[in-house]
Image (spheres, grey):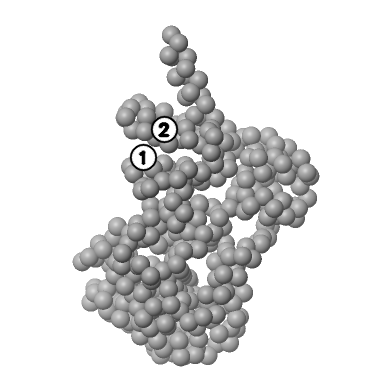
Amino acid sequence: MRHIEFHDREKEITEIMRLLNTDPSLITFIYGPINSGKTELITHLTKQLPENYVVFYINLRGKFISSYDDFVRALFKLDREEKEYKAILKKISEVSIKSLKYTGIPITEDILELFFRERNYEDVFEFLEDYFTEIAENKVPVLIVDELQKIGDVKINSFLIYELFNLFIRLTKELHLCHVFAVSSDSIFIENVYSEAMLEGRCRYLLVDDFDEETTTAFLDNYEFSDDEKTVAWKYCGGKPICLVELVNIPDDRKNKAKEMLKIRKGQIEEVVYSLEARDKKMFDMITRILFEFIEKDKVGYKYLNDEIKFLVGKNIIFADSVNKELRPQSRLNLLAIREVMLSITTTLESTSHQ
């Protein structure tokens, strides 16, 4: 299998670097459709940072978090080489290598045991404030939490997400200590964040979208796609990176591979839609009413996330852009599949009405 190089994203990198070159002031939410390259962008960017930055990257993907202990385990990483807390901070402050990055916040066993023994998240947040305060004396700390929505429904006394937001606001807007980036593909979570009054004037949003046609063409040029293959790739995949990579890894008969991917996605969406018709005809009618709009349009506006939109978002069929108040399929492949399914339903309805 070929190694796929990181491609472009200069616009997003320039914007993030502009933010990193100023004092921390706002929480930055990085959002976009699924598989648009958000994590890849962050991973690439952190490798390019100058030596005065230190990155704490916490990826909650695949982690089950339902309690205080789960949260602490996700947040911190035991540094078995260091026995003293001050030694960890000294190492972080003094090490002078490019792209200093930690997958979790390194602490000693004594502190970790204290957190588990006391079981008070306020102690954790106070510790983090002190932690970043000390690091900020010599370095620029950057905290990145990927898949933040994983803790959206967790309650520890009150909802954990609100307490975490308060910490983020404290670190950025109030103390200007640490840059905070929250990454998520969850449209419903971002919508809730966007409408949350406590975050008004305290956060910004950066959309990481699929490639446009020009960028897609340039990406495919790196892998010797013919003009016909580029046309096929754009028709079926649009600028969805993960879909394009599928075609890159199949150098022979890419057109049939693209058709196969569409066939599979169409079948998946048919399963969702028709199974809904069997158990909830009213919901089916409302869902199909939304999907019918995509026969003629690539995007449609919305005022709020109703149950039908949430259903489609939850099934990864539709992406809801909260900032621009737009609905669109999660990918070009989804758009084509939706159109085929809806045209099939239209044909069935017309046939039934004539009987």
Q: Amino acid at mark 1?
A: Glu
Residue 222 in sight here: yes
Task: Pick whichever, 299 or 88, lies toward us.
Answer: 299
Q: CA distance from mark 2 to mark 1?
A: 10 Å
Circles 2 and 1: CB atoms closer than 8 Å: yes
Does label 2 or label 1 sit earlier along the sequence?
A: 2
Q: Locate residue 254, reporting x and y percent.
A: 71, 40
Secondary element under disc 1, as helix, strand or loop, is: helix
Q: Locate residue 27, reporting x and y percent.
A: 42, 71
Residue 281: quarter of image: top left
> Which residue was labeled with disc 1?
308
Residue 289: quarter of image: top left
13 horizontally vs 112: left or right: right
> Which residue was labeled with disc 2?
289
Q: Is residue 327 above or below residue 96?
A: above
Residue depicted at x 64% and y 48% = 244
Residue 2: quarter of image: bottom right
Q: Is residue 121 above or below residue 149?
A: below
Residue depicted at x 45% and y 79% = 24
Tag in front: 2 or 1: 2
Task: Pick whichever, 209 or 244, lies toward us.
Answer: 209
Q: Locate residue 38, reporting x and y percent.
A: 53, 60
206 horizontally vs 311: left or right: right
